[in-house]
Image (cartoon, helix red, strand yellow):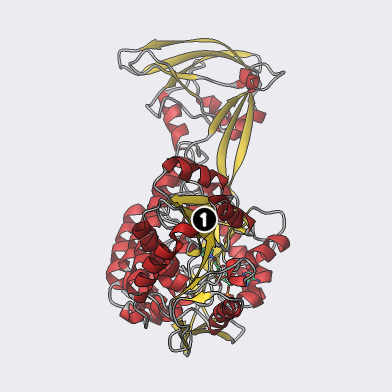
Amino acid sequence: MNLLQLGGAQSTCPWNIAQICEQSRTSARAGRSSITSTSQEIMENDVFKYYSEGEWKVSSSGKSVQVINPTTRKTQYKVQACTQEEVNQVMESSRMAQKSWAKTPLWKRAEMLHKAGAILKDHKKPIAECLVKEIAKPATDALTEVVRSGDFVSYCAEEGVRILGKGEFLVSDSFPGNDRTKYCLTSKVPLGVVLAIPPFNYPVNLAVSKIAPALIAGNSLVLKPPTQGAVAALHMVHCFHMAGFPKGLISCVTGKGSEIGDFLTMHPGINCISFTGGDTGISISKKAGMIPLQMELGGKDACIVLDDADLDLAASCIVKGGFSYSGQRCTAVKVVLVVESVADALVKKVNEKVEKLSVGAPEDDCDITPVVTEFSSNFIEALVMDAKQKGATLCQEYRREGNLIWPLLLDNVRSDMRIAWEEPFGPVLPVIRINSVEEGIRHCNHSNFGLQGCVFTKDINRAIQISDAMEIGTVQINSAPARGPDHFPFQGLKDSGIGSQGSIFVWECCVFYAGLIVEKRMMIMVFDAGFSLCFHVGLSVEKKMVIMLPIQSSPFWIFRKPSLRWHVLMEADISGTIFATDFLNEGRGGSVTLNYFWVWQEMGKLKDGKFSRDVIEAMSENPDFVTSQS
Ligand code: NAP
């Protein structure tokens, strides 16, 4: 079976798990062959196809966009330049697919994501190869990115089941002026179609960081990958395709952001945008309509080094933090603020380590590889020249060949230099000598960015005080800034972003809290006494019932039957009719879920005013039963 057949075999009914498992295993075996077999399916005439309605397609534009290899500076790949009409089509199929996906039980969504995560890890090599060619990521880091992404997808599935399966229960008398007459149940509900736009530096990881949370929460997803990194992203999407997600649930449209970006971000079919990148995000936020935005943008992460710091540790973290992937990380250390008394010693140690960094091709796994584009190289060079002209000390000779820029530490940088404030996104690192910690904090807070930062000191009390004073998303104490582990909260203030990433926090972006307010008198309570003295109240209501039933509940009592099941005998007045019901607690966490609308229809089945066990069981099978899926 080739990959095309596998793709074609994907089902619109996603919950035949055995079939999916087998399909995934077969896909994974097939996928191990090489990138070539996958490419045959997703490429035509040397141009990679885009992904829409569960199929790989050639754009009717007849145009392609070149992906330039940063090392060779020659065209490495070509991707489709999608048209507005194709985007419209994607939005429509995405909208349709989301409707049924939202009804797919949470645990089944999780099953599929686990499959996708496993397939992704199984395809790490061919995808990593693309990362090496498209964005000059060192070979080992490229592999790590894919594996980490597969792990994230699985972790997200796991966490999603727990977190999305929970809601809140509020009572009205906690707010002044109210009696306990109302209950409010909140649950997390998908938004609809999520548009995901990741940046070039982590085109796989920062794509799945958006895809997995959106999907597990019941959304559909439209991906617009960065042009540099588009082919790695298409291969990643192919893994989701092989996992058998319903058609239209995931789509991937390619093209230059400058050409189709506005059309995508202002499209009326989009219900949420999750974007990672630079200033582009700020302009998107001004153009997007009334939809939730998650923006992970630039940073100017400051590293404050105090006089009592472990300078060896600080130097190691500064070099790792500042120069990994040639400084092209949002959380790279982008300015060192060191107190004057230890500045000479720190600069010496950092320089010793900088000299040892290997410079060259990503295929050779060098520490410093070419930066992503010629435009970037020119921008970095301009920052260096500005600083040099204004009197900064270049600790190494400035050297550049094509897009390859040798690592450079700039000492004695002052705040009138551009590099003190701007994000080079390259292997050049400014050092500002400060006379006091307060001066360092002031510099950090004066930045328009507020992503991460770090503090090096042996005094934990001072570290915490400084951390509190730094107006940034996250402070690392005695270690370099970093986004991971991927389940930690990650967010920026000011121009660094809106909202949080990190799997246990990311839901806030792609769900809204649906409230269900119920008059207390209408509730049916089921008590689960368990075997302890502590009563646990389980309360489940189906949304549709609130408008249906004017129930006046009267006292109820519980008794225990020899079967060891707890039963609740309840008397209620429904439209003037007194009847008694017998609910079975089937061990579902102490609650029985009733779809009253459905029950209402089934009332004819009640014998002597009692629910039979058959009815209770049938209710559990009701497809509208959405609150206990996890
Ligand atoms: P970018 O130029 O802002 O591009 C990011 C994405 O936006 C790309 O997919 C790009 O597509 C797309 N795009 C461009 N114009 C658009 C438009 N008008 N509408 C919609 N999308 C558009 O950023 P980058 O150079 O790829 O990445 C580097 C930046 O990302 C740095 O500033 C870095 O700090 C930031 N970053 C932040 C985080 C974080 O989590 N805070 C993480 C990583 C990177 P094309 O490639 O086709 O232009």
Q: Quadrant of the N terminus?
A: bottom left
Q: Residue at x 59, y 86 (%)?
A: 63
Q: Which residue is mark 1?
A: 452
Please name the amino acid that badge 1 sits on: Gln
Can residue 520 be seen at all in this image of the molecule? yes
User: Which residue is more in the foreground, 541 or 169?
Assistant: 169
Secondary-structure class at tag 1:
strand
Q: How many marks?
A: 1
Asked if residue 487 is positioned above or below residue 624 in the image, the reply reads below
Q: Position of residue 374 (x, y in %)?
A: 54, 84
Ligand 1 within 8 Å of the CB at mark 1: no
Asked if residue 9 is positioned above or below residue 362 in the image, the reply reads above
Q: Position of residue 262 (x, y in %)?
A: 68, 70
The quarter of the rendering in which ligand 1 is drawn is bottom right
Would you say 12 lies left or right of 359 here? right
**Crowd rating for badge 1 (residues with CA inside 10 Å; few <14, some 14–19, many 20+):** many
Would you say 186 lies left or right of 140 here? right
Q: Position of residue 50 (x, y in %)?
A: 52, 75
Q: Residue at x 40, y 75 (%)?
A: 137
Q: Position of residue 6 (x, y in %)?
A: 37, 70
User: Which residue is more in the foreground, 351 or 154?
Assistant: 351
Asked if residue 70 is positioned above or below residue 152 in the image, the reply reads below
Q: Quadrant of the C terminus?
A: top left
Most extreme residue toward the front is 341
